[in-house]
Amino acid sequence: MSEPEPVDLSRLKLHSVHDRKHISQLDAFASVRQAGASFAEWFDSLPNFLGARKLRAAVDAIVAARQAGKPVVFAMGGHVVKVGCGPLVIDLMRRGIVTGVACNGATAIHDIEIAMLGATSEDVGDTIRDGRFGMVRETMEYFSEAAKRAARDRRGYGRAIGELALERKLPNCGYSILATAAELGLPACVHVAIGTDTVHMSPQMDGAALGTATMDDFHRLCAIVRDMGDGGAGTCGVWCNIGSAVLLPEVFLKAVSVARNLGADLDNLTTVNMDMLRHYRPAQNVVGRPVAPGRGHDIAGHHEIMVPLLRQALIERLGTLVRDK
């Protein structure tokens, strides 16, 4: 092949910059606030691009859902509790903004250990070497008892875990998301995959009871997702996946399928994914597949920064709502 002649750029067809559609414009730029500005003023000053735009959209959707009396669910991985965001979630529950919670087994364990001890989490790299990892008597006993109660009473694993904390008057119950849900009568669903949690190593854990307990919670979650439908009113609930990379996005996808199969209209459902990293399953099973384009928002950031931001933005707009909404 012969070497090609260079192109003649003088033959390019140009047009005016004034005829071009622009993505970035001054009216979306950040405004500069002075020291002493209120949070609302600061939040309004954020540039209206990418993550800030998605965060605003998430806030708007949650505000609209609660004003319409639709559910707002926080589905949380363990790090939300481990990095100290439990009090913020609890505050949103008490204000009537978050109407239900879902979590995996690790979240429940950290939540209850905080209620029991005011501390949680261990150095796995250290304790896995001599077989001490997860081998704590009190936590194993607690969750074994909760699973048996849940299987017997058929009230769900999350409810049994929270009620047991209240019954035992654990010293830090006020910091427990699941105990608060039980106190307020809010749905709290705990979804486990057997073998994923330290308490499954307990000789006391009854696998049949655990399976019944978490299956009951899945059935309850399907009802919650069904009730997120707009019923023709135009406003749906909001599902927030915060820090679960695999299990809760998978659970949510199945609950959406059940709800739609039973006739729920979820076309106006809004979903939000908040995590430090972007993962495949939340992107597909929360932000993408279940909702119409534009109604799923993926917001990357550390929980200890993003959850406080979300909570403050919500209470600036909503304050406190009646919980039965």
Image (cartoon, rainbow, N blue to C red):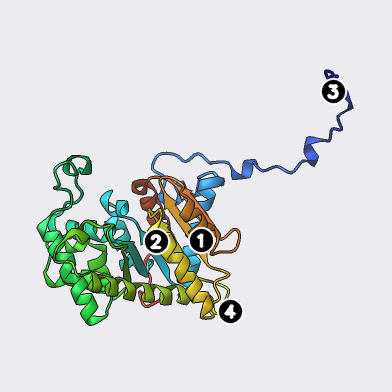
Q: Secondary structure at mark 3?
A: loop
Answer with mark 4 or mark 2, whichever residue precedes in sequence: 4
Mark carried by residue 248 = 2
Measured Cα–Cα span from mark 4 to mark 2:
27 Å
Front tag of 2 and 1? 2
The residue lying toward the viewer, choosing from 34 and 288, is: 288
- Label pair 2/1, CB-CB below 8 angstroms: no
Q: Earlier in the sequence, mark 1 or mark 3?
A: 3
Q: Which residue is mark 3?
A: 7
- Left or right of 100? Residue 213 is left
- Depth check, front residue: 27 or 137: 137
**C-alpha separation, residue under disc 1 versus residue under disc 3:** 51 Å
> Disc 2 to disc 1, how far (Cα)?
23 Å
x 39%, y 55%: residue: 242
- Quadrant of the image occupied by residue 108: bottom left
Please rate how many residues cluster around mark 1, counting C-alpha atoms within 10 Å: few if below 14, some from 14 to 19, many from 20: some
Between the C-alphas of marks 2 and 3, the distance is 54 Å
Q: CA distance from mark 3 to mark 4?
A: 58 Å
x and y percentages locating residue 287 in the rendered image: 52, 57
Q: Which residue is mark 1?
A: 60
- The three-letter amino acid code for the residue at tag 3 is Val
**Residue 228 image position (x, y, % from top left):** 47, 73
Which dot, 4 or 1, sits closer to the camera? 4
Gap between marks 4 and 1 measured at Cα: 20 Å
Q: Residue at x 38, y 59 (%)?
A: 247
The local secondary structure at tag 1 comes to helix
The local crowd at label 2, few if under 14, some if 14 to 19, many if 20 or more residues have their Cα within 10 Å, is many
Name which residue type carries label 4. Answer: Gly
Mark 4 residue element: loop
Identified by mark 2, the residue type is Leu
Q: Amino acid at mark 1?
A: Asp
